[in-house]
């Protein structure tokens, strides 16, 4: 069974640009969550989608947005990039919303110059 | 507001000895707790969990202890092995369809 797949793995952008990251969950998993990992801050929750609907949302500004498609694949978008957006963005899927066991992808490393 | 806290950013332990990783939480509504392990260039992987109705859960070399009155949990690894060197994240969730909240992580180094 294929794991969670994230693309691209690495990308470099400049301030003011926007970026779109993609995540394909494990087959059969309808929930996709996004986390931002930065040194000293751990994993900060961005949002979660289930069956194309945003079910949970973290405390990030509106520049961070996401969506989920009918095949459960998800994208997150960051507009007007800032230097502080440089981070590892992790996607995770789970079988149901009431389980705590998440399956993570390898992440997308974003560097903003 | 960091609801799940891991106050030790790093820990070094000799191979064969016990590793104890600690985690504190502030939200009394959390009722399920998990530990994840993360190697460099990989995503975190689930390690072990515990429900709030228990105070201990064991899986091989890994044991998680929960002290609800102190809002504290710990992960014990016995014996520690060099392959255990990784970043360990404590996580928690409330009941129902809620997000999983993670701590800041503790980097464990097991010295051969």
Image (cartoon, helix red, strand yellow):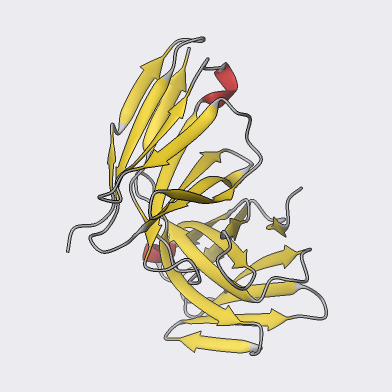
Q: Nearer the viewer, residue B82 or B62?
A: B62
Q: In this view, does A63 lie to the left or right of B1?
A: left
Q: Which of B91 and B8 is in front in this view?
A: B91
Q: Report x, y in % for residue B3.
A: 73, 57
Q: In this view, does A3 lie to the left or right of B93?
A: left
Q: Say which residue appears at 54% left-offset and 25% top-offset.
A: A85
Viewport quadrant of the C terminus of chain B: bottom left
Q: Report x, y in % for residue B64.
A: 58, 80
Q: Report x, y in % for residue B92.
A: 61, 66
**A68 over B57 or under it: above or below:** above
Residue B85 falls in image quadrant: bottom left
Q: Say which residue appears at 61% left-offset and 57% top-offset.
A: B101
- One can see residue A93 in this view: yes
Q: Nearer the viewer, residue B42 or A77?
A: A77
Q: Nearer the viewer, residue A76 or B107?
A: A76
Q: Say which residue appears at 82% left-offset and 81% top-offset.
A: B69
Q: Say which residue appears at 53% left-offset and 68% top-offset.
A: B35
Residue A101 falls in image quadrant: bottom left
- One can see residue B18 in this view: no
Q: Residue furthest left?
A: A1
Q: In this view, does A52 lie to the left or right of B53?
A: left
Q: Report x, y in % for residue B10.
A: 61, 53
Q: In this view, does A14 lie to the left or right of B63?
A: left
């Amino acid at each position: 069974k294929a794991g969670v797949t994230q693309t691209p793995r690495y990308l470099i952008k400049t301030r003011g640009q926007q970026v779109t990251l993609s995540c394909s969950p494990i087959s059969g998993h309808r929930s996709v969550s996004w986390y931002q990992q930065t040194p000293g801050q751990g994993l900060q929750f961005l949002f979660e989608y289930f069956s194309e609907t945003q079910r949970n949302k973290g405390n990030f500004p509106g520049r961070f947005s996401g969506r989920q498609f009918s095949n459960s694949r998800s994208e997150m978008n960051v507009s007007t990039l800032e230097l502080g957006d440089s981070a590892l963005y992790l996607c995770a899927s789970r079988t149901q919303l009431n389980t705590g066991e998440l399956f993570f992808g390898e992440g997308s490393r974003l560097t903003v110059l | 507001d960091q609801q799940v806290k891991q106050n030790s950013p790093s820990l070094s332990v000799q191979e064969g000895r016990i590793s104890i990783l600690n985690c504190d939480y502030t939200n009394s509504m959390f009722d399920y707790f998990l530990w994840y392990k993360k190697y460099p260039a990989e995503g975190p992987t689930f390690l072990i969990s515990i429900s709030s109705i228990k105070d201990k859960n064991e899986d091989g070399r890994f044991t998680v202890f929960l002290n609800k009155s102190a809002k504290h949990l710990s992960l014990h690894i016995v014996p520690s092995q060099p392959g255990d060197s990784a970043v360990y994240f404590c996580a928690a969730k409330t009941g129902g369809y809620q997000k999983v909240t993670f701590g800041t992580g503790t980097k464990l180094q097991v010295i051969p």
